[in-house]
Image (cartoon, coloured by chain):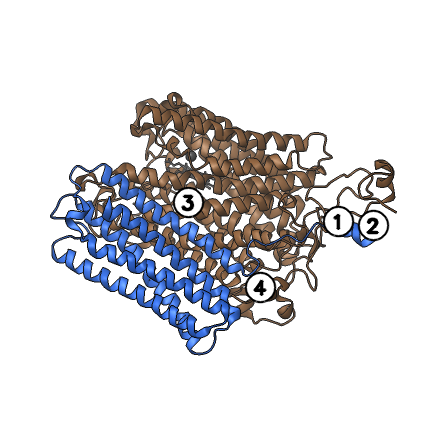
């Protein structure tokens, strides 16, 4: 072994980063872990309040589960188009990126529109932040707070993705930015996953 | 994000270009400047929180007499200098809130986390410098909102730092309206600020360690800050959600925590303490990390049981999620559950004990240098032992039911949380030369240390006796209770010590300001320490390392290595075997080949 090999051996390999392609990816994972805890707290609170309540209405008797099932389906589809958008930019196919990014945004916007429709309907029927003609008032509270918090996340996602769509239309997005789209996709899938939990606990069970 | 090649190569490009005043000192994205900003914020708030404590101590020693010099404070905050009951409630609430969230956290995590992480792992800055800047400014905003609460009608939050519902869920229960709202809003903002900090700290430590800086070559203070960042990341969002629910209950007519509408007051306690217990470790872990580094450096010995130290912090991080119920023993929980919480709490004492014994093992046989940072670190350990031992009593449910909510508890947690102040001083005295490029005065430092240590114990040790004697915490006037009247001399004694404790801090302020302006300029490595930050100039320039990143060749605590000329071996110094070493290990020793 020559001198430089000795030095090499004692240095050990340079520490390998977890996400060498971009720091932002790990940053997003970390953020999502924290954000998951805020949803977790809301859902745990929901569980405790519902368990302790004597007159919690059965969700399907108040909420239109059919519509929300469709909304869930829509959100899952938008996750699929997000995957395709990422695939597009990774291949350098910017037209595919734009098309599927637009479809993803459309999915998000339709979801929000349907949620607005659902909310107006329920509010019209008397469900409110602190009132519920079908029983426990906390049913209304938790419903609006949890779906509202999730809706805010979808809104944020739509804005986030729209920024990239605009950038791409202005020609500022290149194949080399694929990891940024990947980060945005992480967020979008997370919001989707959270919705599946919300749908299960607040609508189905 | 920019492409990674540029990021790892670091800002070599802009190492040399000059930034204007605003970008250098105010809206800086340099981790060192952000660290300094957090330090000044924290020290200012420490003075505010301390002043509130002094007012409380006046009231407890000489209840319902006018505080000298406070006659000007308008009603209803004070009545001709006398502290009314409502104000007393605000005092202990805000004292604790400010100390925990705006003094200890900004200094230990905001300042030292920011300053030390990139320097000690050999990086040029944090992973996301702009996010880092926003984290400071939102933290400051949170602080201003918190301070604003003192000036709104109805006064500041008065429901204790734990803000138990339903007391805090309706304005009429405490008479505090916007004070409590601002309290909630401020902590929500701080939650966002802290989340940004966590994202930076975790990503930076995981991704940006210099070549050769393996996980088990990280200094323990970096381990502690890394684990703290994880705890904060997962704990604070739970508090944020709970704070939002409380805010809705107060302002939008919901009933999350109000039984009258089917809500559960206990839900608040569960959510709060699910955050609150990890929070206790958030406060104490960085202090433990600082202590480990300082003890090793000034004992000129490797830390005893490095891996045990790192693993016990990891164990604490896991266990801290399943002990929260020990704050709720008297809430009427199922005794089986209570016992489970009691056992998990006793288990979490084990890693803490491991750390204590390892500190003692580090000291054993060392050539100890009693410099000021070392004195403060030793004091932290001794206070921590007292706080840790008194904690064991409380973990046992039968005893806790007796001493719960007495001054025994106040004594216990001050030995731990206010004891952190000693680790904080240790850190400031130790790293001041690196942060500001000048040394603090050692003589003044020692003059600051001894009275601080003595009066601290004079304040908090007698509180154990008050507690066992039955004095409840959070009471306005102990003299209202006949059985407490014989204990009153102890209260007077404590207050006298508290005022002296406050007074001697002037020595620190003088030393700090004077050294900042005219202290002796410091060389790179004034304490002959091993860790990487000492390899950079004092203070380090923008980009920290000039042209090339440092390369790490060994662990952080290799002091007094046999056969070496010096008693320290910096991490970035090559371990190329010296002739003496080769002799010691014989011909087959290590990688020595011809
Ligand atoms: C160094 C001087 C200090 C003094 C003289 C002091 C004094 C006090 C007193 C007298 C109380 C009890 C009030 C009551 O129950 O009626 C109290 C409560 C408290 N203090 Fe301190 N304290 C000091 C430092 C600190 C520090 C540095 C921290 C935290 C980092 C801290 C955290 C707390 C907490 C959490 C409470 C409980 C508040 C509540 O009951 O909601 N204290 N302090
Ligand atoms: Cu605890």
Distance of mark 4 from mark 2, alpha carbons? 34 Å
Q: Which shade is chain B?
A: brown
- Tag 1 residue: A9
The residue at the point 29 percent across, 27 percent down is: B332
Distance of mark 3 from mark 1, alpha carbons? 41 Å
Chain identity of mark 3: B
Q: Residues within 10 Å of mark 3 (few under 14, many from 20)?
A: many
Marks 1 & 2, CB-CB < 8 Å contact: yes
> Which label was assigned to residue B235?
3
Q: Residues within 10 Å of mark 1 (few under 14, many from 20)?
A: few
Q: Secondary structure at mark 2?
A: loop
Tell me: residue B339, above or below residue B69.
above
Classify residue A111 by image quadrant: bottom left
> Which label was assigned to residue B4?
4
Q: Secondary structure at mark 3?
A: helix
Name the residue at the bottom extreme.
Answer: A170
- Tag 2 residue: A1
Marks 3 & 1, CB-CB < 8 Å contact: no
Horizontal and vertical percent position of residue A58: 17, 44
Task: Same chain for labels 3 and 4? Say yes or no.
Answer: yes
Classify residue A115 by image quadrant: bottom left
Distance of mark 3 from mark 4, alpha carbons? 30 Å
Distance of mark 3 from mark 2, alpha carbons? 51 Å
């Amino acid at each position: 072994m020559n001198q430089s090999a000795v030095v090499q051996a004692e240095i050990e390999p340079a520490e390998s980063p977890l996400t060498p392609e971009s720091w932002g990816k790990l940053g997003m994972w970390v953020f999502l872990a924290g954000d998951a805890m805020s949803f977790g707290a809301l859902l745990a609170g929901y569980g405790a309040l519902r368990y302790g309540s004597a007159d919690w209405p059965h969700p399907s008797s108040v909420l239109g589960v059919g519509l929300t099932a469709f909304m869930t389906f829509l959100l899952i589809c938008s996750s699929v188009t997000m995957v395709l958008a990422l695939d597009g930019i990774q291949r350098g196919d910017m037209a595919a990126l734009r098309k599927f990014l637009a479809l993803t945004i459309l999915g998000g916007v339709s979801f929000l529109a349907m949620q607005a429709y659902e909310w107006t309907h329920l509010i019209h029927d008397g469900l409110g932040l602190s009132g519920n003609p079908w029983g426990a008032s906390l049913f209304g509270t938790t419903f609006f707070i949890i779906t509202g918090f999730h809706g805010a996340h979808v809104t944020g996602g739509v804005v986030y993705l729209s920024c990239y769509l605009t950038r791409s239309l202005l020609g500022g997005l290149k194949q080399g930015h694929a990891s940024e789209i990947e980060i945005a996709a992480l967020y979008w899938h997370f919001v989707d996953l959270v919705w599946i939990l919300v749908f299960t606990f607040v609508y189905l069970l | 994000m920019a492409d990674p090649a540029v990021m790892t190569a670091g800002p070599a490009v802009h190492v040399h270009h000059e930034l204007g005043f605003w970008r250098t000192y105010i809206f800086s994205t340099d981790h060192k400047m952000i660290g300094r900003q957090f330090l000044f914020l924290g020290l200012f708030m420490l003075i505010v929180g301390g002043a509130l404590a002094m007012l409380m101590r006046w009231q407890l020693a000489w209840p319902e007499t006018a505080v000298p010099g406070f006659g000007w404070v308008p009603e209803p905050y004070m009545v001709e200098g006398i502290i009314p009951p409502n104000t007393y409630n605000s005092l202990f609430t805000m004292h604790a809130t400010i100390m925990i969230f705006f003094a200890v956290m900004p200094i230990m995590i905001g300042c030292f986390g920011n300053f030390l992480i990139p320097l000690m792992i050999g990086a040029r800055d944090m992973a996301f410098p702009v996010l880092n800047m926003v984290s400071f400014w939102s933290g400051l905003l949170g602080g201003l909102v918190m301070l604003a609460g003192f000036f709104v009608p109805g006064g500041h939050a008065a429901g204790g730092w734990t803000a138990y519902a339903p007391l805090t869920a309706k304005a009429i229960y405490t008479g505090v309206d916007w004070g409590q709202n601002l309290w909630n809003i401020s902590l929500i903002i701080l939650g966002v600020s802290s989340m940004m900090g966590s994202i930076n700290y975790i990503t930076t430590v995981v991704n940006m360690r210099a070549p050769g800086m393996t996980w088990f070559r990280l200094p323990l203070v970096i381990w502690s800050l890394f684990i703290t960042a994880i705890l904060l990341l997962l704990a604070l969002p739970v508090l944020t959600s709970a704070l939002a629910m409380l805010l809705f209950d107060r302002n939008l007519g919901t009933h999350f925590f109000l039984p009258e509408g089917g809500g559960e007051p206990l839900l608040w306690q569960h959510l709060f303490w699910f955050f609150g217990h990890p929070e206790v470790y958030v406060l104490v872990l960085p202090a433990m990390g600082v202590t480990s580094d300082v003890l090793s450096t000034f004992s000129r010995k490797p830390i005893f049981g490095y891996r045990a130290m790192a693993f016990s912090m990891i164990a604490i991080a896991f266990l801290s999620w399943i002990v929260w119920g020990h704050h709720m023993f008297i809430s009427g929980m199922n005794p089986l559950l209570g016992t489970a919480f009691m056992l998990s709490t006793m288990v979490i004492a084990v890693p803490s004990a491991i750390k204590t014994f390892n500190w003692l093992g580090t000291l054993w046989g060392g050539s100890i240098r009693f410099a000021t940072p070392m004195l403060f670190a030793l004091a932290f350990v001794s206070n921590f032992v007292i706080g840790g031992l008194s904690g064991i009593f409380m973990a046992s449910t039968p005893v806790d039911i007796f001493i719960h909510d007495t001054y025994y508890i106040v004594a216990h947690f001050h030995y731990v949380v206010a004891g952190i102040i000693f680790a904080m001083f240790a850190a400031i005295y130790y790293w001041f030369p690196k942060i500001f490029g000048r040394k603090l005065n050692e003589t003044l430092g020692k003059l600051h240390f001894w009275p601080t240590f003595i009066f601290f114990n004079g304040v908090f040790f007698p509180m154990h006796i008050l507690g066992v004697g039955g004095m409840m915490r959070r009471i306005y006037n102990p003299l209202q209770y006949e059985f407490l009247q014989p204990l009153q001399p102890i209260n007077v004694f404590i207050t006298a010590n508290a005022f002296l404790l406050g007074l001697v801090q002037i020595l620190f302020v003088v030393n700090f300001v004077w050294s900042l302006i005219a202290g002796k300029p410091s060389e790179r490595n004034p304490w002959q320490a091993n860790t990487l930050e000492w390899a950079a100039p004092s203070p380090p320039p923008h980009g920290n390392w000039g042209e090339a990143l440092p390369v790490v060749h060994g662990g952080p605590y290799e002091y007094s290595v046999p056969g070496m000329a010096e008693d320290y071996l910096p991490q970035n110094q090559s371990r190329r075997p010296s002739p003496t070493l080769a002799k010691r290990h014989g011909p087959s020793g290590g990688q020595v080949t011809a």
